[in-house]
Amino acid sequence: MQAVQEKQEQRAEHLKGYLAAGATLCIWTGFVLVSRLGGKSALTPYDVFALRLITASLILLPLAGSLLAGGEWRDRRLWALSLIGGLLYGLFVYGAFKFAPAAHGGILLSGLQPFLITAIVWLIAGTRPTRLRSIGLAGIAIGVLCAAIPYFTHWSPELLLGDALLLLASVTWALYSVLAKRWGFSAWTLTRAVALGSAVLYLPVYALWLPKALDAAPLSMIVTQGLYQGVGATILAMIFFLRAVASLGPERTAAILALVPVTSGLLAVPLLDEPLTAWLLAGLVFVSLGAYVASRPNPATNPLRS
């Protein structure tokens, strides 16, 4: 009887984990689409980034008492993470979506993360990828090449710039992820420190010197960007992600989130009126499958298997 009850509790816990992972998938997919929507609007990339930081800061500042009282804000590593995963990532990613379509964002942001994180860990810690992970990384490489093939026939400097910025954003986020894990900060500490630290570094510069177009954008667009970027992408996505990892483990969660390139690329067709070519579709499929395989645990060596 006790075994049956424990099995039911485990199923209920897994269900909560899958629901949390699904919520994270939806938010991350929406991030790509909403960011591209902002990029196609009158708002400048600097406006979108400022709206994200202002909204997140207004919510997180009243909750930052322990961060300030405990002296953690003096830690140079937190400021480095704010610079890498907050300031640089935000400038690169919102600048990219002014030129690059959402499908490219799905591939180069979410799809490349397993590849880039593996490369950075190899460089920093000397840890070589397993055979299974190497197969997945090969699939990611094929997918990126498929998405890049149309450049040989009809590329533009603007699209090339957008993809270059997406690649830089992906590299900075991968570096941020590796350093955050290596330095051992809690997710709640990072959520507050990166948002508030980025706001301190960026908002004064934005207010004084950077170009703005808030008066040219409708109020609905400003509210959408502020709420989604500041609340959804910065706060809620982290909460759901951690809940999924706690219930399912990091490997299963990462495997589910490998669907972001597919969901964002397909939804961009009806919602943003973006084309879906055969090459791009092939790229979406290869990157997603490769990311899924690369995120699977190695049963022989991985102690986190669940």
Image (cartoon, helix red, strand yellow):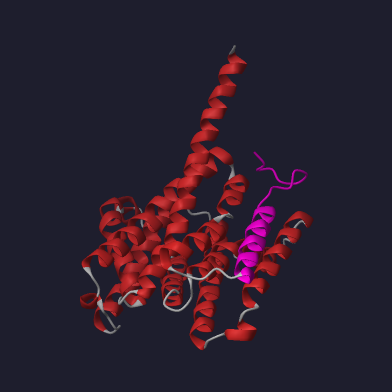
Which of 289/66 is in front? Answer: 289
Please name the residue shown 62% across and 63% down the image.
Answer: 117
Residue 200 shows in this picture: no
**Can residue 241 be seen in this snapshot?**
yes
Residue at image coords 42%, 69%: 36
Q: Residue furthest bottom?
A: 157
Q: Looking at the image, which residue is at 53% across and 77% down?
A: 163
Most extreme residue toward the top is 1
Q: Where is the C terminus found, in terms of image quarters?
A: top right
Hey, which quadrant is residue 294 in on the image? bottom right
- Give the percent coordinates (x, y) of residue 55: 28, 61
Q: Position of residue 201 (x, y in %)?
A: 34, 73
Q: Is residue 163 left or right of residue 78?
A: right
Number of marks present in the image shown: 0
What segment is highlighted magenta in the picture? 278-306
Asked if residue 33 is positioned above or below residue 98 in the image, the reply reads above
| Residue 295, magenta (yes or no) | yes
